[in-house]
Amino acid sequence: MRDSAAQGMGSPCCPAFSRGDGGPEPGEKGLAYQETPELLEGVKPVPGSLEAETPNGPAPVGDPEVRLSLRRWAVVVLFSCYSLCNAFQWIQYGSINNIFVRFYGVSTFAIDWLSMCYMLTYIPLLFPVAWLLDKRGLRLIALAGSAFNCLGAWVKLGSLKPHLFPVTVLGQVICSVAQVFILGMPSRIASVWFGSHEVSTACSIAVFGNQLGIAIGFVLPPVLVPNLEDTEQLAYHISIMFFITAAVATMLFILVIIVFREKPLFPPSRAQALIQLKPPEEYSYVQSICRLLRNTNFVLLIVAYGLNTGCFYALSTLLNRMVIQNYPGEEVNAGRIGLTIVVSGMAGALLSGIWLDKTKTYKKTTLVVYIMSLGGLVAYTFTLSLGHLWVVFVTAGVLGFFMTGYLPLGFEFAAELTYPESEGTSSGLLNVSAQVFGIIFTIAQGKIIDRFGTQAGNLFLCSFLLLGTFITVFIKADLRRQQANMDGEQTKALEEVPGDSTAPVVLDESKL
């Protein structure tokens, strides 16, 4: 993080997280004596070891050692879990849209807005949250995101009567605020905690949780809340779903307080080492945004990413309505089709992350996935109305594999194009584009479906995916982060004393 004062702060509610709190924790390798800043000054771990990190503490001044921390896996998995919970709450209304319409006695469009409020809230809150991420760091953002997610889940428990629709709207809006603290985190966590050879895989794991939450949100609500006529029985089943969600969200918030740390003691890559050596006073958030918006390749990626992800948001929100219109009474299968889209997408996201780590072919991979997303949507469009559900499952799976698999690709491509700017800011701008297009596409496709049918609505989305494909062609693969890591390795090779593995490495700060 760029604010050294924020990095040195511990948690006021958990004194064990403050600097210089004692020796190594159980299960982590570290020094066998009190780890005060004075003792750590100039001390280097055994070459090749995985050292224990002191929470929120900066790397010792002048020590450019690159090391990996075992805690990185706990951090990314925990983030993935509370992102899962938040994503579940986004789609839990849309996946049984018709049931909530009858329970609350409101229009279909009103229930659609329970999903679209996630997109709307993100737009004005992105920049304040991105500023907080740069000034106060990962831990504060993680605490805020999991706290709002927990609070929103409990508020929804007060909406179990048909006349309490405004309460469920309030709970969903609170959850949508939590999403602002979540969506821009994957690439930042990957860069701050993971080495250059695993950063894309880590980003995919972080995105994986969000997609799994959407998958569960498609399949679980139709099972927990059957389509019953009796309002009291319906309220009972809805309460079960809300109670389970609130309990999970509470447990995850507690784990974030206990487990989540600001950053490892030593940078995990040369690129991160360069960023951490940059004086905090030289960083300007406003100037960073201006530089990003002057980056032509990144601006093109913003538009392309928004078109692809906006289509995914619209499809997810309106999936129940599209399936029910073609296959009446198939609420459970509508959820299963949504599950198929997202689960296949998770596989695509994970494989694309591994592929990027091995090949670093960001432009080619992004373009191929975009083209396949368009092909998948065209196939889904023309098979939805054939009357064979198994065919819809197959085409939906192909569509999800590529369309959802595109999400971490966009984050990582943006991080490469914009290095050394904050990953939180670049990811945030991508997500703003996605939310704007998501709202436009959801409203427009919904109106088209009501008037002309599902095929016309899906062809509307196909036209914008085609536009996004052409835009992607013109993005140049200016891989700045990859180049910084390569330069760091070359500097190390040139300045290391032959035969002395402990010789210090001098990083070239002119590359900042």
Image (spheres, helix red, strand yellow):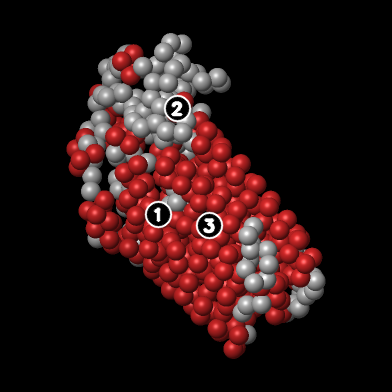
Read off the residue under disc 2. 15
**Horizontal side of residue 217 vs 457, given as left or right:** right
Q: Amino acid at mark 3?
A: Cys
The residue that label 1 is drawn on is 427
Give the quarter of the figure containing the C terminus. top left
Q: How far across and how far down the image is residue 368, in percent?
A: 49, 61
- Asked if one can make out residue 234 in the rendered structure from this viewpoint, the answer is yes
* Element under disc 2: helix
Q: Position of residue 216 (x, y in %)?
A: 66, 56
Local secondary structure at mark 1? helix
Res. 380 image quadrant: bottom right
Q: Residue at x 56, y 38 (%)?
A: 254
Say which residue appears at 55% left-offset and 42% top-offset: 253
- Counting residues from the start of the chain, the first of labels 1 and 2 encountered is 2
Q: Amino acid at mark 2?
A: Pro
Depth check: give the residue in front, 99 or 366.
99
Q: Residue at x 32, y 60 (%)?
A: 297
Would residue 369 be found to the left or right of residue 270 on screen? right
Query: Farthest residue in the top direction?
Result: 33
Q: Earlier in the sequence, mark 3 or mark 2?
A: 2
Q: Which residue is mark 3?
A: 175
Tell me residue 352's x, y (percent): 53, 51
Give the label, 3 or 1, closer to the camera. 3
